[in-house]
Amino acid sequence: MADTSTALTSADIVAAAYDAIARGDGEAFVGLLADDVVLIEPEGHPYPGTWTGKDSVVAALPGLLGALQLQGLKVHGLFAEGENVIGMIEMTCASRSGQPVVAEVLEHWVVRGGKVVQTKPYYHSCLTLSQELAS
């Protein structure tokens, strides 16, 4: 009997990651990460840095999510070429004043062997995000 199952594409993996983030399902998100994953947040982000390794990323998640106060995530598109996926997203975060801040973001994901090995976001206005969310 032939195997008719279809392997998940890189875009499928990234879509699952966004879905897990939107649902607040940290366990599902972490399950998509490679052991040697690298997460890069730029200077100007409320919680900048580079985290290497799944344990490092897991340890950083409370700080990252706490800094963003994520209230919503909308995926506008995923564009994939092999192991590279670009996600066009819109994040709604809570500002210090409690008013929502909408951040437009492009994220470059690299997926190998069905696991995320790198993610690096590019914010449309990192300065505004940092000013509105920083304590």
Image (tube, grey):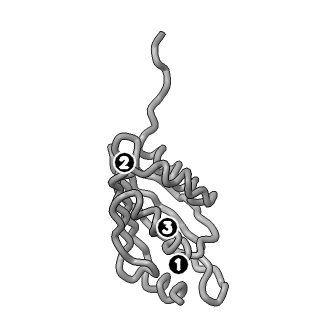
Tell me the CA gap for discs 1 and 2: 26 Å
Q: Say whether disc 1 or disc 2 marks the residue closer to the N-terminus.
A: 1
Q: Which residue is outermost to the right? A: 98
Task: Find the distance from the CA under tag 3 to the CA under tag 2.
Answer: 19 Å
Q: Is residue 109 left or right of residue 23?
A: left
Residue projecting furthest to the top: 1
| Secondary structure under the numbered disc 3 in the rendered image | helix
Residue receiving disc 2: 111
Relative depth, front residue between 29 and 105: 29
Label placed on residue 67: 1
**Amino acid found under the numbered disc labelled 2:** Val
Q: Is residue 127 left or right of residue 96?
A: left
**Disc 3 versus disc 2: nearer the observer:** 3
Tell me the crowding category of disc 2: few under 14, some 14 to 19, or many 20 or more residues within 10 angstroms, Cα based: many
Query: Which is more N-terminal, label 3 or label 1?
Result: 3
Residues under labels 1 and 3: Cα distance?
Answer: 10 Å
Q: Where residue 58 sits: x, y (%)?
A: 46, 62
> Dot 1: few (<14), some (14–19), or many (≥20) neighbours within 10 Å?
many
Say which element carries label 1: helix
* Label 3 sits on residue: 61
